[in-house]
Every structure is written in structure tokens, then in C-alpha cells.
Image: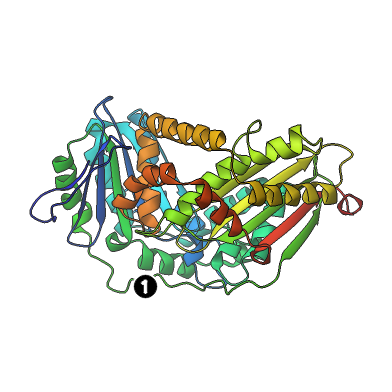
């Protein structure tokens, strides 16, 4: 059930049979959105602030500034010492962290429920009063560069996916790595960071999500006292980004690196994202990912390439549709020893053609829907998972009603919907990548 509280909030109630958690929503006078997920089973609370800005919102030539700023938010403010928030959380037996994506940046703490007022006070402080120094920027820049070196530059799979995404999105900022290009990280300046912070880190560009053992009215009162005192950013720009033009030619990437231990084929398509009030096509793509590659034993690709034909060690498929702009649908094949990448790709294409001809087995579709229903039940056991679900959705322009409708839309997907979704997988809007240890392995 979703409800809006108090005279400052319009009244609304939505039935939510798939998600039994009590969800209360509202908006502060300065524009900050508030979502409260009530779960009284344990005396803990997850407190999250989601900013509707990520790496895809960065200006040209400063890739990585959103992620660098995420690091810098743990430095000093006008009222806190550097690292004080994390230290206080740890001293109170809690955990905290942050993460940056293409479309949002989020900060969270998991603490005892009676520590919520303190968390809200401290988080509101760093939303408005970050006190950076040039030394802070330089120190964290080196940390980010080391992070890139260890997680991307030293990982051939990460480097390959980075190149593939750059080929898939030629104009959209989704083609840039979230962590940033090394050369641009090295050139980031304190004015770059402050400009990003002062523009995007404002209450009218943020969503507060509180989940756990809380009273919604008390959370709203605390939100007014803490975040409500921060003025809105009058110069917040409209979220308009460079768009990907219609793609008219298939693209290919050949990536070789001696550190690759197992060659594989990966294909990614540009497909529609989940849109507010219009998630039907996205739901079909999500279920299609499960049908084609959700299981190593019963999926279409596993059946065709692993069991009926001795082609693949592993196959996979998946849809990532929670985004502001175009989403992606991916397929992967790891061939058996002795099977070339060309043979693996040909087998993949033959399996897709067979699916388009024969459609989905009704029993398989029923099993997948049952698994999806079960996953919704299990999701209720994690207040942090629910907080992430709502925060991510609202950060890309969806509404609470869309989050609550999503499980039902998945259950409503038909066999014909799956065929229509499969027909959306246009080779002219795709990149196929071969990855191997040597150039010879790409032949």
C-alpha cells in the first residue's frame, strides 16, 4: 500500500498485492522527494539519499567527475571532520557506503533505528556544506586512478566491455565509463568538482528513501527539520542529454589480450528502457532475458548450445532497463575448447532464429513466471533491497506506481509479447564482440 501523509501532501492510495511493504511518499517544500518503506521486523533502518545525476550527466571533457565527487563527499564539511560520518556509523554498529552509476549517485547507511535522526542530520550537512580543499581533490583523484587501474586496466574483461559500450553508444554519454577515461580523470580540477556539486547536489534533485523500523510521520517530520532547511537549487538544469541517433549498421569489436583465460562472444543491443506509465515492452524484454539465458540448464540458449549441440560451456542473456535513456539487452556464449568464436556466434544466431520460428515453450514460461513471483516474495526480506529498488527507479524518472506495477507486468507477459520483444533485437542496433587471448584466436 502506498500513501501520502499530511496537509503538505496530496492523498493517494495504490494497491500493491506483489509488494506487501507499506510505502509512504511525499515531497518537501524545497522539492526533495521522500519515500518511506515501513518494516517493523527488526529495529534497524536503511537511510539513503539518491541524487538524480550520474556519469551520463557529466559535461564533456570531465568524465569521472561524478564518481570523484562521490569519494569527496566523505571529506570534511563545515560541521564534520573528514571521515566523521563513516566513523560515527561504525561506532554505532552500522555500515555505510556510496555508489555512482550512469543515471544516479546514492549514499546510504544501515544503522539501529534510533540512530536515524543523527544520520539525517549528517547526510543533510554534506548535501549543502562540503568544505573541499585542493589537497582533498588530489588525494581522491589518486585513489580513483588506482581504483581504475585495479578494476579496469588490469581486468581484460572490464577493458573489453568498456570498448564495447563505447562502440554501442556513439553519441549518448552511456558510451563513457562511469569511472571515467584515465586521461580525463588526471585532468579533473577542483572547479570541475565544485561546479558539479553546486549544481546537482541539491534537495530538488534528490530522493530520500528510508526503509525499516520507522514511523512514516516521524520520518517526514525529521526530513522537514534536516533536509527541508536546505534551499532548492534555482539553476538546476533540465535533464536533457545527447541522444543516440538511429543506428543503421551493425558494429563489431575484436578484442585480444594475453590475460584472457577463456574466449567468448558477447552481443549487446540498444533497446527501449522502462518508461513512466509505459513499461510493457520493458517487461517483455526482462522476461525474454530469463527465457533465453536465465538458466544454465533450462534456458533456450543452454538447451540449444550446451545440451543439444556441443558448442558452449556457458550461455547467458539479460536486460538492463532501469535507465533514463536507451537500455541494453545482452547475449553471451563461452564456447567449448575446439569451437571457434565464429562457430559459437553462428550457433547463437541459429538459436535465435529457431526461437523466432517456434516461440517459447508454455511450460518454460510458466516456470519462469513462478520463479519471478518467488523472487518478489524473497525481496521482501531485504529492506535494503527494497530501498534500492525504489531509489533507482525514481532516479531515472519512474514513479512509485511504476515500481509497484512492475511485478504484475512481468506476470502478464505472453508468448506473443516475447516474440515481439525478440524481434526488437535488431542487428543494426547492436555490437558483437569477440574476446580472445591473441589475434589468432579471433580468426
229 or 360, nearer to the observer: 360
Compared across the picture, whether 401 is left or right of 146 comes to left
Quadrant of the rendered image containing residue 199: bottom left
Compared across the picture, whether 319 is left or right of 196 comes to right
120 or 260, nearer to the observer: 260
Asked if residue 122 is positioned above or below residue 176 in the image, the reply reads above
Q: Name the residue located 45 percent from the left edge and 61 percent from the top edge.
A: 324
| Residue at disc 1, secondary structure | loop
In this picture the colour scheme is rainbow
Q: Position of residue 177 (x, y in %)?
A: 60, 59
The residue positioned farthest toward the top in the image shown: 42
Q: Residues within 10 Å of mark 1 (few under 14, many from 20)?
A: few
Q: Position of residue 302 (x, y in %)?
A: 69, 36
Q: Name the residue located 55 percent from the left edge and 60 percent from the top edge.
A: 271
Q: Name the residue located 61 percent from the left edge and 63 percent from the top edge.
A: 186
373 or 45, nearer to the observer: 373
Quadrant of the rendered image containing residue 141: bottom right
Asked if residue 367 is positioned above or below residue 216 in the image, the reply reads above
323 or 338, nearer to the observer: 338
Q: Position of residue 310 (x, y in %)?
A: 82, 35
Circle 1 residue: 238
Amino acid at each position: 500500500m502506498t500513501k501520502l501523509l499530511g496537509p503538505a501532501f496530496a492523498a493517494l492510495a495504490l494497491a500493491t498485492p506483489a509488494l506487501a511493504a507499506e510505502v509512504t511518499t511525499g515531497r518537501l517544500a524545497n522539492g526533495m522527494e521522500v519515500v518511506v518503506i515501513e518494516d517493523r521486523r527488526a529495529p534497524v533502518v536503511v537511510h539513503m539519499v539518491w541524487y538524480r545525476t550520474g556519469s551520463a550527466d557529466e559535461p564533456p571533457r570531465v568524465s569521472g567527475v561524478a564518481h570523484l565527487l562521490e569519494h569527496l563527499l566523505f571529506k570534511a564539511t563545515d560541521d564534520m571532520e573528514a571521515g566523521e560520518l563513516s566513523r560515527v556509523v561504525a561506532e554505532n554498529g552500522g555500515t555505510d557506503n556510496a555508489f555512482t552509476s550512469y543515471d544516479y549517485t546514492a549514499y546510504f547507511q544501515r544503522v539501529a533505528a534510533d540512530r536515524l535522526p543523527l544520520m539525517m542530520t549528517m547526510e543533510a550537512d554534506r548535501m549543502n556544506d562540503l568544505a573541499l580543499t585542493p589537497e582533498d581533490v588530489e588525494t581522491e583523484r589518486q585513489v580513483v586512478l588506482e581504483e581504475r587501474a585495479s578494476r579496469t586496466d588490469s581486468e581484460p574483461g572490464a577493458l573489453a566491455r568498456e570498448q564495447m559500450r563505447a562502440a554501442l553508444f556513439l553519441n549518448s554519454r552511456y558510451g563513457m565509463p562511469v569511472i571515467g577515461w584515465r586521461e580525463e580523470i588526471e585532468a579533473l580540477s577542483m572547479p570541475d568538482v565544485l561546479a558539479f556539486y553546486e549544481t546537482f547536489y541539491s534537495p530538488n534533485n534528490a530522493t530520500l528513501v528510508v526503509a525499516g523500523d520507522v514511523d512514516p510521520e516521524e520520518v517526514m517530520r525529521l526530513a522537514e527539520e534536516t533536509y527541508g532547511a536546505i534551499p532548492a537549487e534555482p539553476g538546476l538544469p533540465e535533464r536533457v542529454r545527447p541522444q543516440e541517433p538511429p543506428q543503421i549498421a551493425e558494429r563489431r569489436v575484436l578484442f585480444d589480450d594475453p590475460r584472457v583465460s577463456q574466449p567468448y562472444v558477447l552481443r549487446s543491443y540498444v533497446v527501449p528502457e522502462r518508461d513512466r506509465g509505459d513499461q510493457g515492452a520493458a517487461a517483455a524484454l526482462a522476461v525474454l532475458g530469463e527465457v533465453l539465458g536465465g538458466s544454465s540448464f533450462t534456458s533456450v540458449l543452454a538447451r540449444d548450445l550446451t545440451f543439444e549441440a556441443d558448442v558452449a560451456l556457458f550461455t547467458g542473456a539479460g536486460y538492463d532497463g532501469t535507465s533514463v535513456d536507451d537500455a541494453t539487452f545482452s547475449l553471451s556464449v563461452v564456447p567449448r575448447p575446439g569451437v571457434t568464436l565464429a562457430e559459437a556466434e553462428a550457433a547463437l544466431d541459429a538459436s535465435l532464429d529457431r526461437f523466432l520460428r517456434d516461440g517459447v515453450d508454455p511450460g518454460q514460461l510458466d516456470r519462469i513466471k513462478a520463479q519471478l513471483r518467488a523472487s518478489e516474495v524473497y525481496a521482501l526480506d531485504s529492506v535494503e533491497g527494497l530501498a534500492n529498488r525504489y531509489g533507482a527507479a525514481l532516479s531515472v524518472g519512474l514513479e512509485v506506481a511504476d515500481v509497484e506495477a512492475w511485478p504484475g507486468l512481468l506476470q502478464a507477459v505472453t508468448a506473443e509479447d516475447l516474440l515481439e520483444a525478440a524481434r526488437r533485437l535488431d542487428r543494426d542496433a547492436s555490437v558483437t564482440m569477440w574476446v580472445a587471448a591473441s589475434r589468432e584466436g579471433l580468426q
